[in-house]
Amino acid sequence: MDSTVAVVVDLYKSVHQQLRGIVENLDSNELNWSPGPEMNSVSVLVTHTLGSELDTLLFVRDLTGSRDRDSEFRVESASADKLLAAIDRADSVLDEHGGGITRDELEATRTRPGRDPQVGLNWLINNYGHAREHLGHLNLTRQLYQQRS
């Protein structure tokens, strides 16, 4: 595996571990609670983060996925077991597709509709930042749940 790819895969696996640490300590009410209208639950944030990651991995490899982004925001009753299984699947996909990314794929310019063209490595780093941002949202949502009156 290319050393740059290995670093990116390790960073994503770190996100997965942090997701596990959040999910495994919450009950169903906490996982599915939303702080307010147009705000996301922990379940939605985990589902969306993993969906975005998979989509980006496939995009960088110039493969087509079947992502339904809108459905990621309609998750209403996920259990910890279901979310942990999704994180485990994301680890497997990361091993398969992340580990298979070539230097050529890292350097290939790819364009998403409405976005500027970027090389594969840029898309991966941008998506990793997206995942870290959602980790912050997850922690804040958990804190808000604990502080609600």
Image (tube, rainbow, N blue to C red):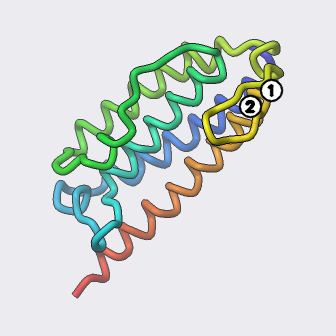
| Residue 79 on image: x %, y % | 20, 45
Which residue is depicted at the point 20% across and 56% down? Answer: 27
Could you tell me which secondary element the residue under label 1 belongs to? Answer: helix
| Residue 8 on image: x %, y % | 70, 32
Camera-nearest residue between 4 and 123: 123
**Is residue 65 depicted above or below 112 in this figure?**
above
The quarter of the picture where residue 78 lies is top left
Which residue is depicted at the point 47% across and 63% down? Answer: 137
Which residue is depicted at the point 81% across and 15% down? Answer: 103
Q: Amino acid at mark 1?
A: Thr
Circles 2 and 1 in contact, beta carbons < 8 Å: yes
Could you tell me which secondary element the residue under label 2 belongs to? Answer: helix
- Furthest residue toward front: 114
Camera-nearest residue between 64 and 17: 64
Residue under circle 2? Answer: 7
Identify the mark at residue 4; answer none if there is no mark.
1
Camera-nearest residue between 68 and 49: 68
Which residue is depicted at the point 35% across and 76% down? Answer: 144
